[in-house]
Image (cartoon, rainbow, N blue to C red):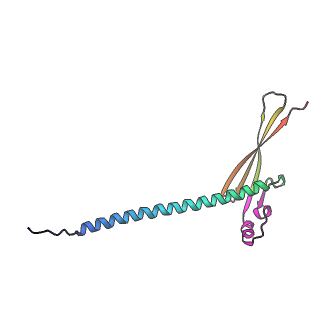
Amino acid sequence: MSQKKQAITLVEVLVSIFLIAVVITAVLKIQTNNITSIEKFKNTSLYNSYISLVCKTDKQNNRDKNIYLYDVANFDDDTIRKEFKEIKIIIKDEKDKDLLLPKNDYLKVAHIQKTTYTIENKIKKIFYTFSLDSVKK
C-alpha cells in the first residue's frame, strides 16, 4: 500500500489568493464608507451645534442678517475664537402665513413666521415661530 501525498496545485493557490483579495477589498471599502459617514455626521452635528448656539442667543435685531458666530459667542480660547471668526450664519426671516382661527372668545389670528439659518451652504435649518392675536373685549 503506497500512500499518495496530496499537494496543492497552482490553480488552487491562485483561487485562494483571489478570494482573499476580494474579501480584503470588500472590508477596506466598508471601512472607507464608515469613515466617510462618521466624518459627515461629525460635521453635521457641529453645524447643528453652531445653529443652536445662535438660536439660543438670537435677539430680534439679528433678523435678516449675515452674522458671524464670533459676534454671538465669545470664548477665552484663541483657537475657538479663530474658528468662530470664519463661520458665517445667514438668518432669513419671512412671514409664512396667517391663519384665521375658528370663532372663539379668546384668539383671533395665528401668525406663522419662518426663520432659516444657513451656514455657508453646508447646512440649512428652518424654524417656525407662532404668535397669536387675542380678541379684544
The C terminus - image quarter:
top right
Q: Is residue 95 left or right of residue 31?
A: right
The N terminus - image quarter:
bottom left
Question: What percent of the width, then of the height, locates residue 22?
Answer: 37, 63
Question: What percent of the width, then of the height, locates residue 70?
Answer: 77, 65
Q: Residue at x 74, y 59 (%)?
A: 89
Question: What percent of the width, then of the height, locates residue 59?
Answer: 82, 54
Work out which residue is located at the far front of the displayed protein and give it: 1
Instruction: Place residue 48 in its image quadrant.
Output: bottom right
Q: Is residue 89 left or right of residue 36?
A: right
**Residue 66, magenta (yes or no):** yes
Question: What percent of the width, then of the height, locates residue 34?
Answer: 52, 60
Above or below: residue 72 compared with residue 115: below
Work out which residue is located at the far right of the displayed protein and give it: 137
Work out which residue is located at the far left of the displayed protein and give it: 1
Count up the numbered dots: 0
Instruction: Place residue 106 in its image quadrant.
Output: top right
Task: Please state the extent of the stretch shown in magenta in the rendering.
Answer: 65-89
Q: Residue at x 79, y 65 (%)?
A: 74
Residue toward you, 72 or 100: 72
Instruction: Place residue 45 in its image quadrant.
Output: bottom right
**Residue 121, magenta (yes or no):** no
Q: Residue at x 75, y 67 (%)?
A: 85
